[in-house]
Image (tube, grey):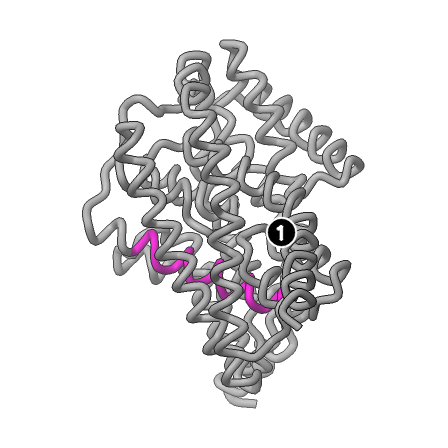
Amino acid sequence: MSLPEQSKSLRGSLPPVATALIIGVCGGMLFKLIRMPLPWMLGPMFAVGMAGISGRRVGEIRGGRQAGQLVVGCALGLYFTPDVSRHILNFGGYILAAAFLAIAIGALGGVVLKRISGVTAVTAFFASVPGGASEMAVLAERAGARFDQVALAHSIRVLMTVSIIPISMTMTGAGGSELYTPSTALITAHGLVVLFILAVCSAWVFMKLNIPNAWLLGPLTASLLITISGDSLSAIPPVLSIAAQILIGCSLGSRLKPSLLSESRRLMMGVIASATFTLCLSMTMGLVIAALIGETVPTMILSTAPGGLSEMCITAKILRLGVPLVTAFQVTRLAIVVTCSLPVWRMLHGMGARIGRSGR
């Protein structure tokens, strides 16, 4: 057997998970080489995604996304020093307003999706409100929507947001803020072990309580509570941050399958149009809030962007754009969207039914 044939045979015998990881690391290295923003998340995402669409068997790394989120959650919590936390509390009203407006923006995006793709109103609503993909798909199924179409729409929305915003901000030279820095830069083995043990325990508790994004929010809460008390256990080693980004990027990319190419053209056009519409409205909201509170525009655009929670927070961390403020906005939005979307839909559906009866 020739060397090329042996290489091809070896690639064919690799498990899909190993294939995804190797392709993801290579994608990250390539993006790093060509100086792309967020290379260790966007590189794996695009590389694994393109491999999946082309038909190569790439599997999601079991527990990989959760491990990545755990590291990210611990790192984010280090920014919530007592002074920064008091500063963020001053913006509580804006944070809540942005979260509820996100539902309204999503509902408008649902109208766009319905008109272009022809999906049902309930599917269009849950496919456009910017919550977590898995959480919104579960809520959609309870309301009688198409689970698969909702999951697809949210995957594309997150992929678009994660791709567009970091690249746009890097091209415009978005800078960081000295106000938002981690509580410590010192890495200690003992402190890191204790922090990760507390993070895993917190994630387990959040899972038992059925709290969404438990592997991010649990560790974030544990790290935040330590930091806000004025203490710190350890900084997160850069190599772990890179590994976390690779795992999350591979997870995002593995959602893209060859079946995407055979999806209804109208559905795909509707999802892309709706995602673009909600992204533009969310960015506009960020611009307005930035002007009202005197925060930097890039920070507020990230705070209101309809991307994934961990992905937007990673972007803020890498670009040094108000990490705790972005985290506060994104976490609050996720909590309110997940808890309020179903009641809001039932209210809108009931109003529509009453209007329809009165118009007869």
Residue at image location 60% in from the left, 26% down from the top: 221
Locate residue 322: give its quadrant.
top left
| Residue beneath disc 1 | 64
Q: Quadrant of the N terminus?
A: bottom right
- The picture places residue 307, in percent across and down from the top left corner, at 47, 52
Residue at image location 41% in from the left, 30% down from the top: 325
Locate residue 69: give its quadrant.
top right
Residue 7 visible in this rendered orientation of the protein: no
Q: Main secondary structure of the magenta part?
A: helix
Residue at image location 46% in from the left, 27% down from the top: 93
Residue 254 in magenta?
Answer: no
In the visual, does 106 lie left or right of 15?
left
Assess disc 1: are there few (<14), some (14-19) or many (≥20) residues with their C-alpha within 10 Å of its C-alpha.
many
Residue 166 in magenta?
Answer: yes
Q: Is residue 244 above or below residue 277?
A: above
Q: Nearer the viewer, residue 126 or 296?
A: 126
